[in-house]
Amino acid sequence: MVGGVQHRQPEAGERYDVFHTDCPARDVVDHVTSRWGVWVLISLRSNDLRFYELRESIQGISEKMLAQTLRALVQDGLVWRKVEPTTPPQVTYGLTEFGRDVGEPLTELFDRITRRLSPRSAG
């Protein structure tokens, strides 16, 4: 109960009130649309990747930020994490069904933007 109003889980077919500060969907949206969340989801759209492969594919992300972003996306159910019991452990990440569902429109948006931009020199 917050401010005298009790919040309940939505019934089947209903939606969360994403404009309410206590809405659990808000955290997921925040994680997906964070500075690095979008790039992680887009990077995983075609292949499962190991941590270092993700780090190499997303220029400018630090190991700390990649770890935090992956942790949040795994907790939200968008990304799965598999640890191979080797020395050192090999950790692979991929999109869950939910992650693919959320990532598809992001990929379409990314593709539309890159098609519309005029070519620029790298650097």
Image (cartoon, rainbow, N blue to C red):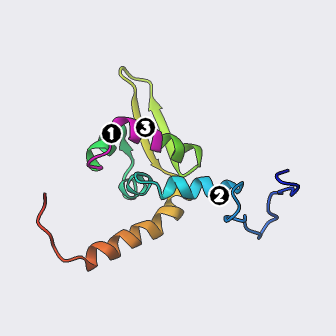
Given this view, does label 3 or label 1 mark the residue nearer the observer? 1
Q: Measure how far apart labels 1 and 2 are at the Cα level.
A: 26 Å
User: In the rendered structure, are the residues bearing label 2 and label 3 in contact, judged by CB atoms less than 8 Å apart?
Assistant: no
Rate crowding at label 1 as few (under 14), some (14 to 19) or many (20 or more) other CA atoms within 10 Å. Answer: few
Q: Measure how far apart labels 2 and 3 are at the Cα level.
A: 21 Å
- The residue where tag 2 is placed is 25
User: In the rendered structure, are the residues bearing label 3 and label 1 in contact, judged by CB atoms less than 8 Å apart?
Assistant: no
For the point 39% across and 53% down, the residue is 44
- The residue where tag 1 is placed is 62
- The residue where tag 3 is placed is 67
- Coordinates of residue 123 in the picture (x, y in percent): 13, 57
**At numbered mark 1, what does the secondary structure look like: helix, strand or loop?**
loop
Q: Quadrant of residue 26?
A: bottom right
Name which of mark 2 and mark 3 comes first in the sequence. 2
Please indicate whether residue 71 sits to the left or right of residue 5 in the image: left
- Residue situated in front as seen by the camera: 114 or 93: 114
Up/down of 116 relative to 44, above or below = below
Rate crowding at label 2 as few (under 14), some (14 to 19) or many (20 or more) other CA atoms within 10 Å. Answer: some
Please indicate whether residue 101 sits to the left or right of residue 36 in the image: right
Residue 60 among those drawn in magenta: yes
Name which of mark 1 and mark 2 comes first in the sequence. 2
Q: Amino acid at mark 2?
A: Ala
Q: Which range is magenta?
A: 58-69
